[in-house]
Amino acid sequence: MQSLRDHVRRFLSDHGIRLDTDLGQHFLIDELILSMIVETANIQPDSHIVEIGPGIGILTLELLERAAKVTAIEIDPRLPPLLRVYVGEERLAKLTMIRGNALQVPLPTEPYHIVANIPYHITSPLLRHAFMESPQAPRTMTLLIQKEVAQKICDTESRSLLSIVVGLFGTPHLMFPVPAQAFLPPPAVESAVLFIDCFEKPRADRETIEAVLRLAKMAFSGKRKMLRNTLGQQPFGKDALEKADIDGTRRPESMDIDEWIRLSQAFSALQLHNQ
C-alpha cells in the first residue's frame, strides 16, 4: 500500500505543483501525527471546523470524515481546485472553500472550532484575529505550530505577550512534538501541536482586555525593566500598581492574568476619578 508521503509526492508531481515555503507550505505527510491531531481536536458529528491553509487537503480529508461542515481558507489560488480532487467529489457537500487571507476573512458567527497546520509566521496575528477581531471566538483551537512558540504560550513561569492574549480567552495545552521529517518539505524549526480550550466568555470585558493588552505591550517593550520603571512612569502608574497590590520591582513576565486585569482596572479607576 502506498504511504501518505509517496501519495502526496506523486499527487503534487502529477499536477505540476512546487510548494512555496514563503507561504509556509510544509505539508503534513505522517499518518500517525495526522490521526493524533484529529484525536486531539475531539471532533463531533455536528462540529463546524475552520481550517487555515488546507493546501491540497491532507488534513481536510480527515476533518470531512468526522465533522458536519468544514470551512477551508486558502491563500494560494493554485490549490483549491486540487483540494477538491484530493478529497473527492462525494465529500464536497460538506466543504466550503474560501480563497483569501485568513487574517482578513471574517470567521463564522456560529459555533466553530479551528483545526489547522498553519503557516508559522501567522501564529500571533491569527490568534489575535480569532480572539480580538471576530464576532465569536472559536470553541477550541488545535494548531500545528512552531514548538518554541507553543512552549511560550503555555509557559506559566515566564509569561509573554502572546501567552497573555491566549490566557484571556482560553487554556492552552502543549500536546506533543512533531518531527521535521513529518513534513514535505521539512521545516527548519521544531514543531508541536497546541490545543486551546476556549472559555465560554473571555476573562474580562472587551474594554478591560484592550486595556490589559495596551499595558502589557508597554511593559514587555522593556521586558527586563521593573514595572515601576515602565508602567510606573505612566500617568497614575505608581498609584495603580499600589492600588492593584503589585510590587513595582517585579517584571512583566511574572504577572498572571488576574493581576493584569486587576492592574488595568486600577488604571481605569484612577483615570476616571481624575477626569
Image: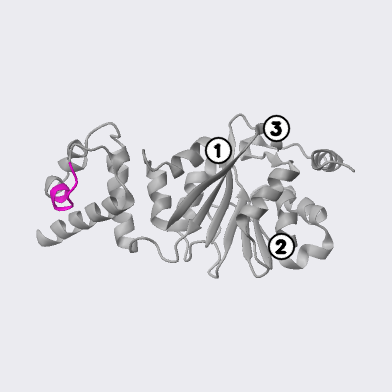
Residue at the extreme left:
274
Is disc 2 in contact with disc 3, using a CB cutoff of under 8 Å? Answer: no
**Secondary structure state at the residue bearing disc 1:** strand
Is 181 drawn above or below residue 114 in the view shown? above
Q: Is residue 255 left or right of residue 269?
A: right
Q: Residue at x 27, y 40 (%)?
A: 219
- Foreground of the two, 145 or 177: 177
Q: Read off the residue under disc 2.
A: 66
Please say whether residue 261 is visible from this viewpoint: yes
Q: Tell me which amino acid carries mark 1.
A: Gln
Q: Which range of residues does the magenta coloring cover?
A: 240-247
Q: Is residue 72 left or right of residue 234?
A: right
Whole-percent x, y for residue 106 in the image: 54, 61
**Secondary structure state at the residue bearing disc 3:** helix
Whole-percent x, y for residue 163 in the image: 41, 46
Within 10 Å of the Cα at label 2, are there few (<14), some (14-19), or many (20+) other Cα atoms?
A: some
Residue 219 located within the stretch drawn in magenta: no
Is 16 drawn above or below residue 64 in the view shown? above
Is 204 drawn above or below residue 117 in the view shown? below
Q: Tell me which amino acid carries mark 2.
A: Arg
Within 10 Å of the Cα at label 1, are there few (<14), some (14-19), or many (20+) other Cα atoms?
A: many
Q: Find residue 146 and name its label.
A: 1
In 3D space, how far apart are the residues under numbered discs 2 and 3 (Cα atoms)? Answer: 26 Å
Q: Find residue 181 and name its label.
A: 3
